[in-house]
Amino acid sequence: TVLLDDRQGAVQDPRVHYDGRKILFSYRKGGTDHYHLYEIATDGTNLKELTFGPWDDIEPAYLPDGGIVFCSSRCKRFVACWYTPVALLHRMDADGGNLRLLTSGLLHENTPAVLADGRVLYTRWEYLDRSVLRFHGLWTMNPDGSNQTIFFGNQQPPGRWTVMIDAMPIPGGNKVAAIFSPHHGNREHSGNVMIVDPNAGP
């Protein structure tokens, strides 16, 4: 069933609401330059735009408290070694109101997902007093942005650099499934499907 037909546009990052009745996604309308967040009923009705402006809003996830977490270039930052915009984690209310920045990293944060205990799991590219390329590890934080903590990936053995991305919780415990991609700049989001157990250590 086609829910949205825009052959000149692009749709990505769909997430189904906890009640199964609506879908949150990123959408760049045909003829426009930026992705914004939209919501649509699972029957294709009630298409609603939630974010606006000259920024890219991508990779949304529903929060258990009714809010939405997502990545956005509205932080107005650029990668230190390349002229490309940075996307950091933001949150907003279900109707798009009360939009605010949650993190203050220097570089990209990607693919947020909600763990069983309510924390947000995401990929963070670290670039301060470290290798420019190596550290794309899994981090967690509370839905209000507090208690930002490494989940897994603070060490990178020589010759085994990876981008840990697209992580999602596995029901019934604290393990997650993630894509371990070749290192920075080499086909991110394409790699091995890995199960990560934070209790096992590095």
Image (cartoon, rainbow, N blue to C red):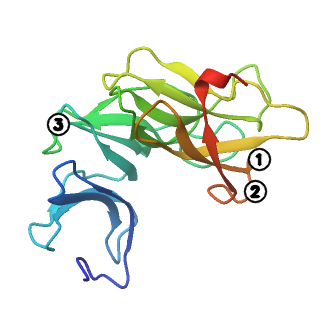
SS at badge 3? loop
Who's the residue at 15% across and 51% down the image? 19
Question: Residue at label 1?
Answer: 183
* Percent of width and height locating residue 107: 59, 35
Who's the residue at 77% across and 36% down the image? 134
Q: Is residue 89 left or right of residue 133?
A: left
Question: Residue at label 2?
Answer: 186
Q: Mark 3: give few (<14), some (14-19) or many (20+) Cα within 10 Å.
A: few
Mark 1 or 3, nearer chain start: 3
Question: Residue at label 3?
Answer: 66
Nearer to us in this view, 142 or 27: 142
> Where 46 sits versus 153, above or below?
below
> Where 106 sits versus 148, above or below?
below
Q: Amino acid at mark 3?
A: Gly
> Where 55 sits versus 45, above or below?
above
* Percent of width and height locating residue 137: 64, 33
SS at badge 1? loop
